Amino acid sequence: MIFDAANTHAFLEAFRFIADNPGFLAHKALEQLELSGAALGIGAGVALPVGVVLGHFHRGSTLAIGASILGRALPIVVLIAFFLTVLGFGFVNNMCALAVLATGPILTNAYDGVDGVDRDVVEAARGMGMSRFQTLARVELPLAVPLLFTGIRIAAVTVVATAPVAAIAGGGGLGDVIVNQAGYELKGVLGASYCVMALSAGVWAALLALQKAMTPRALRSNRRPSGL
Amino acid sequence: MTAAGPVIPNFGKASACITDNRAFCWGWVRAHWHDTLEPHLIQHVELTFVAVAIGFALAFVLALLSHRFRRLDQPVAIVAGLIYTIPSLAAFLVVLPIFGISYTTIEVPLTGYSLVLLYPNITAGLRAAPADVLEAAHGMGLTRIQTLWRVELPLAVPAIIGGLRIAAVSTVSIGTIAAIVGGKGLGEPIFIALGAPHPFRTEIYAAGGLVVVLALSLDLVLVVTRRMLVPWTRA
């Protein structure tokens, strides 16, 4: 897995590689988005309800903080290698590894979002006769949207940016080109790297725009989405 | 030993645990601690420290500049956010043709990531000083530099350490991928184990476990440092 150093012409040739193989790279990029989407879906499906329920009851802050620390401390290489020994090569292994990566930021932000809702507001809602569920659905969740979305956005960018590593365990996507210098030469490796960068920057920008659009108007001015 | 007979290479006697590739073989860890795990662990610690130290120095200077010239803050924050989206695998490979297989190729992306993780935390920390505190400092006759050193920086310590925790843990984690451009760090034994026809479990678990333990210990050290520096704040 060691690459030869080459001259800097490769940087320009990489653009030619992209221009010559647009269909192939688009196909690989789609594969990568599929893998990332599946992983993000599973991660969000597990982490969102847990974070929201814990936040609603103001319990388990240790779990929420621990999830964020552990989420960063578990390297993708280790996760993929670990799941590989359990599940073998392929899509499922990589999806699980990436899903674990996604749970950290989603869980922490969902917890913070719901936990941080003004207690007076919740009390007022209860005083107006709203049930626990109504309070959660109509007061706490809308107020938590900015943070919920921040968590999903961080997780999405992390997953898309990390997905190429899945190629070491037969993951598919642009990573296949990146780790196969013997087959695609340095220009192919660099070209695919450019595509990966563009892809994750695109996902980042698209989700930032979507987040702005989805945030309730009243919350837009005072809670600016953070840069990362 | 007799000269007759075919020469059969002796690869040593592996225990049944290793040949069967069972879940975890302590024997292998004991036998290969000194030639595999320990050197790669030390390399990993070095990689992390260099990257976080240089990243911190750069982020600190940038944060001071954007604290002084507020107009810089938003563009720098956006560029930092964009840099963070660069996939680590791609980052190492794009730097590779410039510096070849060298320490620099590993450190440039790692330093970049810790820089962009530290910058938002340091700027947020510097901005944490309440307006009336700054006014009091001004009223006591403190100059701008004095206010920075004696008021704003001490108040920024919790946020700065928070940033260092994120940067240190992330650098340890991303450092495993650095093994593809030069075989340094704990990623190397994992890649080697993965490259085998039947991935060798013990090596994966041992090296992977060491990475996680390293990350969590650095985090713990920083939490304790914070308790000692600013004991009146709560983590």
Image (spheres, coloured by chain):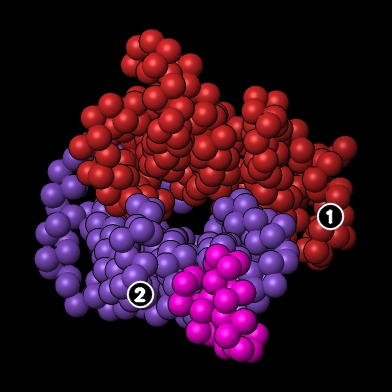
Chain colours: A purple, B red
Dividing the picture into quadrants, the one containing residue B229 is top right
In the rendered structure, does residue B211 fall within the stretch colored magenta? no
Which numbered disc, 2 or 1, marks the residue closer to the eye? Answer: 2
Q: Quadrant of the N terminus of chain B?
A: top right
In the rendered structure, does residue A136 fall within the stretch colored magenta? yes
Q: Chain of mark 2?
A: A
Q: What residue did someone put label 2 on?
A: A216
Q: Is residue B207 left or right of residue B148?
A: right
Q: Chain of mark 1?
A: B
Dividing the picture into quadrants, the one containing residue A27 is bottom left
Residue B126, given in percent of the width and then of the height, sits at 42, 32
Q: Is residue B93 left or right of residue A125?
A: left
Dividing the picture into quadrants, the one containing residue A82 is bottom right
Q: Main secondary structure of the magenta part?
A: helix
The disc placed on residue B25 is 1
Evaluate whether residue B132 shows in this view: yes
**Residue at figure coordinates x 43%, y 30% from the top left:** B132
Q: Is residue B234 above or below residue A205?
A: above
Q: Is residue A220 left or right of residue B171?
A: left
Q: Nearer the viewer, residue A224 or B219?
A: A224
Q: Nearer the viewer, residue A45 or A99?
A: A45
Q: Is residue B55 left or right of residue A80?
A: left
The amino acid at mark 2 is Pro
Evaluate whether residue A100 shows in this view: no
| Callout 1: SS | loop
The amino acid at mark 1 is Cys
Residue A39, given in percent of the width and then of the height, sits at 50, 75
Give the residues in magenta.
Answer: A117-144
